Image (cartoon, rainbow, N blue to C red):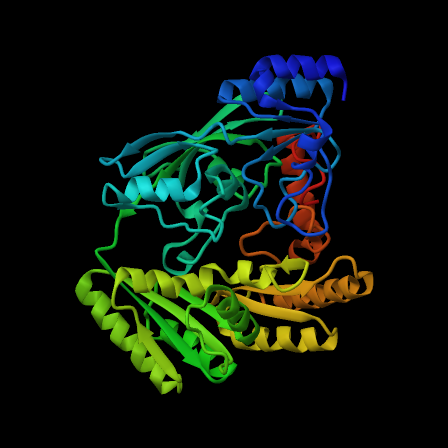
Amino acid sequence: MDQSLVKELGAIVGPENIIADPEGLACYGYDSTPQLESRPGLVLLPGTGEEISRIMTRCHSAGVSVTPRGSGTNLSGGSISANGGVVIQTSRLNRILEIDEENLTARVEAGVITSALHQAVEARGLFYPPDPGSMNISTMGGNVAENSGGLRGLKYGVTSDYVMGLSTILADGQPLVTGGKAVKNVAGYSLNDLLVSSEGTLGIFTEILVNLIPKPLAKKTMLVHFPELEQAALTVSHIIAARIIPATLEFLDRVTIRCVEEYAHVGLPLDVEAVLLIEVDGHPAVVEEEAAAVRDICEKHRCSFFQTAATADEALKLATARRVALSALARMRPTTILEDATVPRSCIEPMVKLIQEIAAKYSVTIGTFGHAGDGNLHPTCLTDERDREEIARAHHAFEEIFDAAIAMGGTITGEHGVGMAKKRYLPKLVGEAGIRVMLRIKRAFDPQGILNPGKAF
């Protein structure tokens, strides 16, 4: 990278907020996506939106690419600089600027950790529902860029359902403010919705305005064991068909159960094919009624064990069985490929069975867990990237899994994004016309193509 440009950019953020040495840059050469690595030319840690604007203005005039990055938990290669340009790391933009109890909103900077927002609003009896698995480290800006979901997505939706406004720096350094606190706002195009899920390709978020809701008064957490996979899948479908919408309805298969128990020792059985983690919340009377109905449905589908948490600590222990699934699986082999194929809820059972058949076909180990209530499954392949032949088989297996998800009316990603890892599958999902429209939007926002190049397309 041109040293005069490095000096100019360093002057904007200060010498203590620039990383240019090879060892420091190596840390930013990857995110949580396996087999992807690309070292940036420079890393900047701005402390304000105004600094980001100045950085983008200078990079735009120099034709230098810029990749925004939060905590680097991305699972599709989205926060890796694909061509050695500049990385803007947002960790210093970490203030919760306002919690407005009258309008039920919170305004945060893009680098705020998701769980920090949870804690701040819940202390006031309010609730921000999106809870991605990486919430203890992922940033709000990253959540918006990828439209993150989480365990509570079935009942409460995903990040896009709560974004009311955004402050964004465009490719040429111009600030763009969209949305606001008005509940109804239909003036012009819905730019908020366009920017959410844009994976850093249209702009860099500096501030985010989100909607809050009252904190549920009560909840019940249940863990259910099933001797057969089909019974668990049918239970999920019948809970939804009974017009019960749990806050959480999560699934773990046999491979995942064994890994979780070896890792966390939460008391999971090793002789069952599946477990469901179910949580209902709301008014205490409704919670009692729904929990009883859930138990009745589970027993009708011949569950082998049904446990209801008696205390908050016990509920946390049960939830741990799902939240540590990825960590538990990742211990087993050097390389963990976690995907998020998503299908309509009615297709969960055939999809999980097909994943098992595909894993057997290619002689790879795949553990499946995920958000069964909304069809968002996480087939996770345990492999070793040093074994090229095995890795090739793993990628063939995932190609069949994605093709099957599309054929069932699903999608290639429910919450991780396209990034670099899945861009070859996007045309299969959206078609030539879809790609053409997306590219036109990209060019309108970023004619030079300097914002997070090499992603999605």
Give residue 327's quadrant in the image. bottom right
Q: Nearer the viewer, residue 221 or 353?
A: 221
Image location of residue 268, percent across then percent down: 44, 74
Q: Nearer the viewer, residue 360 or 428?
A: 360
Image-based side of 232 in relation to 41, left or right: left
Q: Is residue 2 above or below residue 142?
A: above
Image location of residue 225, percent across then percent down: 42, 79
Instruction: Please name the residue shown 69% across and 24% down the image.
Output: 20
Image location of residue 33, percent across then percent down: 65, 50
In this rendering, does residue 190 appear at all?
no
Q: Nearer the viewer, residue 300 or 165?
A: 300
Which residue of the protein is positioned furthest toward the left in this rendering? 285
In this rendering, does residue 124 appear at all?
yes
Image location of residue 296, percent across then percent down: 30, 81
Instruction: Please name the residue shown 49% across and 81% down the image.
Output: 272
Q: Is residue 88 above or below residue 335?
A: above
Image-based side of 141 in relation to 115, left or right: right
Q: Nearer the viewer, residue 184 or 404?
A: 404
Number of numbered discs: 0
Instruction: Please name the residue shown 63% across and 73% down the image.
Output: 355
State which quarter of the image contains the N terminus: top right
